[in-house]
Structures are given as structure tokens and as C-alpha cells.
Image: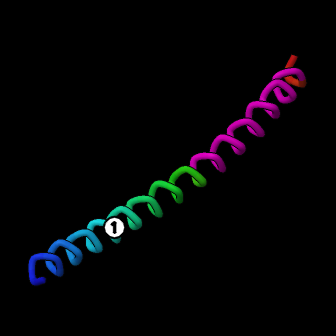
Amino acid sequence: MKKYDEVRAQLIEMLEDLNRRLAIITSDAKHAEKHLEDDLAEQVKQPENNGRQL
């Protein structure tokens, strides 16, 4: 039974590590999407600004 408890504890630790990594990846992905939206908005403004300079 001791071996089972050791394996179980190790698996739980690995699961917690994976959950932490997933949270970081999810946060990064949401952050990247925000930057893409900001970049798109900036790209839309640039042609408008360029047109005024002519």
C-alpha cells in the first residue's frame, strides 16, 4: 500500500504542475489575443492617417 500512496502523491503533484502550466498558457493566449486586437485597430488607423498626409 505504501507504493500506491507514493505513486498517487507523485501523480497528484504532476497534475498540479500541469494545471499551473495550463493556467499560464491560457493567460498568455488571452494576452496575445488582446495584442492582436490592438494591432488590428492600429493598422486600421494607419491608412486613415496616411490618407490625410497626402
Q: Which residue is mark 1?
A: 15
Q: Residue at x 25, y 69 (%)?
A: 11
Q: Is residue 35 above or below residue 19?
A: above
SS at badge 1: helix
Q: Mark 1 is on which residue type?
A: Leu
Residue sitting nearer the eye, 23 or 51: 23
Q: Residue at x 82, y 23 (%)?
A: 50
Q: Where does the magenta region start and end?
A: 32-51
Q: Quadrant of residue 1?
A: bottom left
Q: Quadrant of residue 4?
A: bottom left
Q: Position of residue 3 (x, y in %)?
A: 10, 76
Which colour assignment does the render follow? rainbow
Which residue ends up furthest to the front in the rendered image? 1
Q: Residue at x 52, y 56 (%)?
A: 26
Q: Position of residue 12 (x, y in %)?
A: 29, 73
Q: Is 14 colored magenta in this rendering?
A: no
Judged left or right of residue 47, residue 39 is left
Q: Is residue 2 above or below residue 45?
A: below
